Amino acid sequence: MSEQQEYFGYAGTILRVNLTEKKITKQPFPREWMKKHLGGEGVAAKILYEEVDPETPPFSPQNKVILSMGPLVGTLAPCSGRITITTKSPITEIYSDSNAGGQWGPEMKQAGYDHVVIEGASEQPVYLWIDDDRVELRDAQHLWGKTTWEADEIIKGELGDETIQVACIGPAGENLSGAACFIVNRARACGRMGLGAVVGSKKLKAVAVRGTRGIKIADPGKFMKECRRLFDKITGDGMYGMMQQGTLAIPDLAWDGKSPTKIEPLMRYSHAGKVVCDTYEEISCKNAREKVWDRDLACFNCPIHCANWSSIKEGQWKGEKGEGFELNVQEDCTYMDTCDDVWFMPKFNFLCNQLGLGVDEASLPIAFGMCLFEKGILTEKDTGGIRLEWGDKETVLKLMKMVAYREGFGDVLADGTKKMAQKIGRDAEYWSKNIKGAEVIADTRFAHEVTLAEGVSPRGACHLKGLSLFGVHARNMEYLTPEFREEMQRVYGSPSPVKPFDHRWAPYVTRYLNRLMSAMDNVGLCVFSSHYMLFHAVMLEDLPQLIEAATGVTFSLEELEQCGDRARIMQRSFNHRLGLDRKDDYPPRHTFEKVIKIEFGGQTINMVLDEKQYDEVLTEYYRISGYDEQTGIPSRETLERLGLENIVEDLLKK
Ligand code: SF4
């Protein structure tokens, strides 16, 4: 029996592709990493931490891009189609990663690879073609300049197989736009932080894969039983029906507010949904489902199928079609006030996918520009004569192309709102909503559990690293761990507090969700199937049995939690070596100082974050995470307990 056949769940191989030397090597997946780092983002964080000097410029050939498929990817575990891409970001210039679904990750696992590490940089455009064991770099000069949809079609055509899975960059990545993402299967975006630009800097247009080898399971009978149990948990969850509608269903249900008569610019740029949108019904989930969406779609082996196929049936973009849009596109339209035409959402989404732009990174700088324009901080002198006015859809589409190609004022927008504000000057930076240079999607005034999760996220503002939604988790604490309940008992005198937006429970729920979402990203399951989005579908407690049945590696709940803790610490420690600490875990200053008034339930609510309370929750989060309360840097004791002695040395050098 060969060594490869002895891996279960894991494919057993890390593929390294050095683009400078055109050298392809394969190394066995180290078994000692399974228990310590598990897989996916946990292993990628280790590779980035140990192999990339944090001072490395993001576009240097010394920066690496790590594509990761966790040990459950491509198996029959529900929602097991996720991939993670990890690198140093050109926007935030710190650790960054992004995660996407689709079919590409499972195909890569079936081809035999747990991770693909892209090193160096090519002089000419190339693409990587992986056909099970056969791996080759192919000329991509004819693909350079093509949209992601064109590249996908040409590659499948020249390789003679429509079933091949393709992930690629578009013109945005080629032109090193900070809004560039890595597009999987034409529509699944590894967005945020400009990761597609790092791929572009290496002149790598695409990674195409065909996998036929299958994945071995340690205990098939037990694994099938666990998969069935989780499948039933997901489809039996109280939130399942809503999630089946797509993420757009959330604001339809969640917020029954009424727009104030006058919306000030900061609020328009900061806050999404009905509360800032007079024409919300036009962009509602209900209207999108009736008019735009033709059928539901799902990623690999997913019973939720929150995705959709869309077509534009009326108006100037009539005839365009493709995989549809989700909540962020709707939110982005409210930020820019392009809400009066339901057909604009698919148009905006298709254009982003084709150009290889992240929807948030493309739209938030434009919305920020609109905010500054109304405030008089930005003028036509700065923009080359372009007026940035709320709701101007034609200008938005024009600016998106300028962002992708870094043309004119698009070159300023392409670096995200923090760098954009620094270039503009005139106190513009005060109004930017970013954390560590990454755009904030949810308004950080909303609740402490939102702000804390966004604040401590290692990749900068992020709603996918442990953010609690709408108090759902406060109402379900009986499902959480004994340790968590003990903490609740200590703080409240009760394991189930009744006030969902009480700031004091934010550290505990954030930490639990940090661990849960890290575990999901480590193994390669979609977080939408977890307690993050459903009431109590996949919990941390569900995963040890599933992982053991698939891989043969036993995990206690505590060991699984420690894998999540290690991943977060390695990600944050990459940043600590660059000087980031507690001061960088705060939301934008204006969050504490500028009140946003919202009409809700017949009352006016003043939304502003209490700084003293945020200080308290941040300190408590550090304490329960084993970080120094003054600096947010993990303590020596925590690092030694987790077996991360190498980080002790690194952080002591600082
Ligand atoms: S829930 Fe949605 S994003 Fe997640 S795997 Fe299913 S279809 Fe994909």
Image: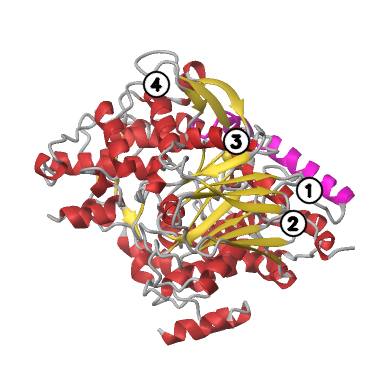
Q: Tell me which label, 4 or 2, sits earlier in the chain.
A: 2
Q: Which residue is mark 3?
A: 158
Classify residue 330 by image quadrant: top left
493 horizontally vs 72: left or right: left
Image location of residue 271, percent across then percent down? 33, 40
Q: Residues within 10 Å of mark 2 (few under 14, many from 20)?
A: many
Dot in front, 1 or 2: 1
Dot in front, 4 or 2: 2
| Residue 343: image tag | 4
What separation in Å lies between label 1 and label 2 (alpha carbons)? 9 Å
Q: Tell me which label, 1 or 4, sits earlier in the chain.
A: 1
Q: Tell me which label, 3 or 2, sits earlier in the chain.
A: 2
Helix or strand or loop: what does disc 2 sit on?
A: loop
Picture quarter with the C terminus: bottom left
Look at label 2 and name its amino acid: Ala
Q: Which residue is mark 2?
A: 11
Q: Residues within 10 Å of mark 1 (few under 14, many from 20)?
A: some
Outermost residue to the top: 314
What is the span of residues highlighted in magenta in the rendered image?
A: 220-248
What separation in Å lies between label 1 and label 4 (alpha carbons)? 42 Å
What separation in Å lies between label 4 and label 2 (alpha carbons)? 43 Å
Look at label 3 and name its amino acid: Glu
> From what the image shows, is residue 171 above or below residue 215?
above
Do the CB atoms of the residues marked 3 and 1 lie less than 8 Å apart? no
Q: Which residue is mark 1?
A: 213
291 horizontally vs 263: left or right: right
